[in-house]
Amino acid sequence: MGIFEPFRAIGYITTGVPFSVQRLGTETFVTVSVGKAFQVYNCAKLTLVIVSPQLPHKIRALACYRDFTFVAYATHIAVFKRAHQA
C-alpha cells in the first residue's frame, strides 16, 4: 500500500454540514453529521467510535470541545457527552 492510496471513504453518507476535528490526548477524531444524528470517527484508522441517537430535526451545525459535542438543530442546541445528551 502506497502513501497516497485511498484507505476508506466516509463522505458518501455525511451531509453538507461542516465537520469538526478534535484531538484528545494522542488520538484525533472527526465528528460528522448524518442527517438527524452524528458520528465520530477515529482519524488514524477511520473507524466508527460513536453514533448519536436520532434528533427530532436535521443537524444544522456541530462543534466539539473535549468530551462534549454541541449540535444545532431547528432552533435548539443540544449538548452530548460522548453519545449521551447532557
Image (cartoon, rainbow, N blue to C red):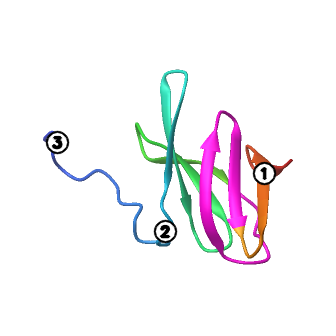
Where in the figure is residue 38, as x and y percent of width and height? 63, 60
Crowd around label 1: few <14 · some 14–19 · many ≥20 (10 Å):
some
Task: Tell me how far mark 1 sits from mark 2, CA to CA.
Answer: 20 Å
In the image, which residues are magenta?
Answer: 52-72
What residue is disc 1 on?
A: 79
- Which corner quadrant holds the N terminus? top left
The residue that appears at 29% across and 50% down in the rendered structure is 7
Secondary structure beneath dot 1 equals strand
Looking at the image, the residue that sits furthest to the top is 25
- Element at label 2: loop
Q: Which mark is residue 43?
A: none
Q: State the mark number for residue 1.
A: 3
Residue type at mark 2 is: Thr
Specify the farthest residue to the right.
86
Q: Residues within 10 Å of mark 2 (few under 14, many from 20)?
A: some
Residue 26 counted in the magenta span: no
Residue at 51 percent of width and 67 percent of height: 17
Report the side of 67 relative to 23 (left or right). Answer: right
Q: Which residue is mark 2?
A: 14
